Amino acid sequence: MLLAPLAGFLINALVGRNLPRRIVGWIGAGSIGLAFIFALAILTQVVGGHHLDQSYFTWWSSGQFFVPFNLYVDPLSTLMILVITGVGFLIHVYSIGYMAEDPGFGRFFAYMNLFVFSMLLLVLSGNLVWLIVGWAGVGLCSYLLIGFWYDRPAAVLAARKAFVMNVIGDVGLVFAAFLVFLNLNVLDYNAIFSRVHSLPKGGTIITAICLLLLVGAVAKSAQLPLHTWLPDAMEGPTPVSALIHAATMVTAGVYLVARMHILYDWAPVAAATVAVIGGVTALYAATIGTVQVDIKRVLAYSTMSQIGYMFLAVGIGAYAAGMFHFMTHAFFKALLFMAAGNVIHAFHDDQDIRHMGRLRAGLPVTFWTFLIGTLSISGFPLLAGFFSKDEIIRAALSVSGGEFILGLVALVTAGLTAFYMFRLFIIAFGWEWMADDPRHLHEAIPIQTIPIVILAAGASLGGYVPVANFLAPVFGHGVDIGTGAFLGLAALTLLAAAIGFAVAYLLYARRPELAAVWRARLGPVHTLVERKYYVDELYDRVFVRPGFALGRFFSHVLEPRVIDGAVDGVASFFLLESREWRLIQTGRVRSYGLWTLGGAIGIVVIVAAYLGYLPFRLG
Amino acid sequence: MGWYALTNNAPWLTLVLVVPLAGALLVALVPSMARRAVKQLGVLTAGATLLLVLLVIGGFQHGVGNLRFQFEEVRQWIPGVGISYHLGVDGLSLFLLGLNALLFLLAIAVADPATPRFKQFVLLLLILEAATAGVLLSLDLILFYVFWEAMLVPLYFLIGAWGEGRRVYAAFKFLIYTVVGSFAMLVAILAVAAISFSQTGQLTFDWPALVAHPASGLAHLPLGLTVGVQQLLFLGFGLAFAIKMPLFPLHTWLPPAYTASPIPVLIVFAGLVSKLGAYGFIRFNLALFPDAAHSLGPFLAVLATIGILYGAFMALVQTDLKRLVAYASMSHLGFIGLGIFTGNLLGIEGALVQMVNHGVIIAALFLIVAMIERRTGTRERAQLRGLATGTPLFAALFLLVSLAALGLPGLNGFVGEFLIMLGAWSAFLPLAVAAGIGVILAAWYVLRMYQGAFQDGPVEPTGFGEMRATDVGVLAPLLALMVLIGISPAFFPAAVEATVKALPVLTR
Amino acid sequence: MSIPAYSFLLLSGAIFTLGAVGFLIRRNPLVVFMCIELMLNAVNLAFAAMSRYLNSLDGVVFAFLVITVAAAEVVVGIAIIVQVYRAGREMDVDELDLMKN
């Protein structure tokens, strides 16, 4: 299972440059397809709640510290690997077309395969150490792929930013593992889950563990406050954005919380923090999404926002709903990104939506699939996004207390989502039909459109997959709230989405001049949102520049002046002192001889005096 | 269990010392014009030593708690004052010995025969190899001291005569620093022996004997020392080791010395010699003065942590790649120090594995910096741009080494840092957190280095050559170790655990 | 018949004094060297005499040691003198002050 993508990576990395592109591409995609078949085989074994736990070799064993390399498969990880390999396979196929012209074709597939391998390792690992290995591995691949076009300074900078932020998360995760080990003496899941109840519920330790885990999850899933890398990550090739920064990697944080749900159930404060972070991020990212003009950045903020939903869900204990949304999100977001990739290609790598518009004639397949994706993410009834998002909002609203407010936030966000997605759609794709398109846009080749169509099917029908039942052995069954409340809440969600759609339609399709008026009217608020609330600038001022300043201070002042200055001070002291003393060294042999003789006589006199041969005595 | 049993009749460890010396002798006999012959002879000697060391590592019996030293050899040397020729290997020295042999082989393999006075260069390297191996193998304090000082001489000449830039200044500074530390250690050695003599009536410099009756022996002996005296002795040894490591703030000899060193010397200097300070801390300070180690450990751990952050910040602003790696090395050595001074099993094991890792990583980094410099004629980050174009193999290998250096899980750097921080977490929590910040900074400066040189520039033909087969061959063993230790390091604790557990600081 | 020990010691002291004075007042390196030899051999004489007088071999052993060291020293010393001479320096120890300060 793991070996297939790894083999694909090795082959492509080692000999990829010498092989014809066709073979490289099919090795890359084929290995993932193979993994998907294995995943299906695993599915048949775990359905009904079984889980597998296999140990392969020992990683480190010393004292009580024993870490094997073991794999753990249950319905939760099965759902993850199905999505990873399934959507991953489609994206690989798409990439064969999308990257066809790129000189780094082999390198690209090597990285992509390595990514899928790391992601599978992350999901399948049976203990925290190997989870961290996979965790860092996907971070690495994300770095490699964001910086894939390493001749672009912006890409290089974005890659470094993503990596450093991910390392912050890694460190949080490592610390969480330390706390787990020091308090429970184990690091593998089964044992953790069975021992966790020996800690006091809601106590400091369990809360600290969960919060540290959350640091890792937040960094990887681009939630507040470690989110700034994700929009910049769009510097990478578009299939990368689809695979890593939408469908799979960024949801690793959700997986982590869901995987550790037994711990979070035991630490209500930490779980509430997860929910709050998710809710705030969902709203925050959605507002930014409303003013961006780069097609991929809109989608990036949309991703952040949707993952905020998932965090919200797992934070309030609706784990199955969160994972359900993960799956549908993987479908429609991968679809949206790949469709966006087609548009970007058609416009020769221009990503500004204001330059686009009226694409129905030129790019029919892309147009319709993108519309399906937009409808799905906005929660159009009976499409996938409708079911999963609705479930989250319902779960939030049906709990009284603080979660209710989060439910309202989610509701508002649903409206905003519909607004910015239709804004994007209207501006970039437009309603109008152009019989004679002077731009001669070309629809992408079938190898790029077929995966999109398959995903469109998923984005439409994915809502009917009984994910909650499938995951029930892991999370238990959710609360049934009755049909009346269900319909009422669904109507509420729909209403929010409808308002969002209506506003977008009004501002951008019917009365475009109104949009300008409102932008002027909102003035500073608009600028604030457009500049992403100045968080990047804040981090630059607070962390990056002081870091360099401190380094420069050490390098230019502290090291030469103070530390080495003290050392040199000792040296120059002796140098100064010796200036006169060394005059004794005349260099004349005979004067040395005289000194020697004098010394010898002196010794003789002293000895003689000691022994009493002289008129005076010593000692 | 070892993989096989070596016969006990052969003096294996003496051979490890003698082979390089014999090689040096042979090199001395070769006419200095025959540069290639000199190099081949040097490589052959170092290779033979490596082979011997591998035999020893293979024959090392695992998990035998009661048998502390293996391949032991004891001979009278100066019986009147209890000095003996006592060699032995245990979990502390086993893998460092392997690192020693490997790095010297690589160092001689990359040495350029066109170097002026090449014969003397190789000769000194081989003598240095014998000295460092001797430091690792000696179990007699005086013997240890002799080897310790013997290291200095070849190193001084190698830097002073073959270095670049301010080489004489650098070599001299290094010498003065080290000698100051060494004298403190000599005084402490004599004091330990004298105290042990006054307590047991037997004058000995034998390590096992002294550890069995620790000079510290507060509880064991009627004439037990106050902790104050023990701390004084601890600091006497500690000064020498702290300078060699180097521990903040005794590090200022390091940047000039590293910058001035020629690459083959740098590989062993940064890769190995710095670790001998850390080794000395474990071997002597933790073993002979467990109480002082307990009371002074926290302070030294703080210094080590300051070193982590300080080195990281310094590395962040360096523009010369060699200096950058030098400070990165200092930061990593801070991790090793932190692990040692936790005084617990995982911390010390982490430090031990990190010593090997650090040697492997730093040697590889310096080799790569040298390869870049040889191709472009500069090490300035600002003058290097986008070298990855057209050199995918070079870029990939450099990236792999960089990732190991920043502690990416799955590669070797992570293993050590994980265990060290785990050990530190249970001993001094704030320091573990600070070390975590060091890890983040490491990601930052390492990527700045890698990207600055290899990416972030216009794609244009740079004329930058791809790695040659010999370059890859030199890096290959290091890369293999990075991956091996990263993925399956279980062999390490298997060999080391028994020794570390028996350390007095743990059993105290 | 035995010669009393003090006469040997007197002779030894006289030779030693001759050597020491010569060392201090002569400038020719070769002569300076000979003066050193004179002092060493004066000490040897004292050693041998006392050895006999005390009926112990220790003194003789020391004398042998001194002879050996002296021989080695002469080899090195003469070599240096010859090198200095070849370098065209003045044969005057007072002029050889390279190590000054």
Image (cartoon, coloured by chain):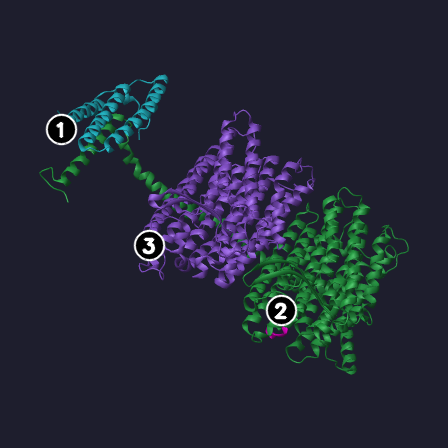
Chain colours: A green, B purple, C cyan
| Residue A160 is at least partly visible in this image | yes
Query: Mark 3 falls on what kind of element?
Result: helix
As for residue B280 lying within the magenta part, the answer is: no
Relative to A409, say whether A613 is above or below.
above
For marks 3 and 1, give the CA distance: 48 Å
Judging depth in this view, the residue of A283 and A27 nearest the camera is: A27
Q: Which residue is denoted by mark 1 in the rendering?
A: C6
Residue B253 in the image, given as x and y percentages of width and height: 44, 43
Q: Which residue is denoted by mark 3 in the rendering?
A: B200
- Magenta part of the chain: A264-270
Q: Are marks 2 and 1 in contact (CB under 8 Å)?
A: no
Q: Is residue A619 left or right of residue B472?
A: left
Residue occupying image coordinates x 14% and y 28%: C5
Neighbor class of circle 2 (other Cα within 10 Å; few <14, some 14-19, many 20+) is: few
Residue A391 in the image, given as x and y percentages of width and height: 75, 74
**Magenta part, dominant SS:** helix
The amino acid type found where label 1 is placed reads Tyr
Relative to C93, say whether B133 is above or below.
below
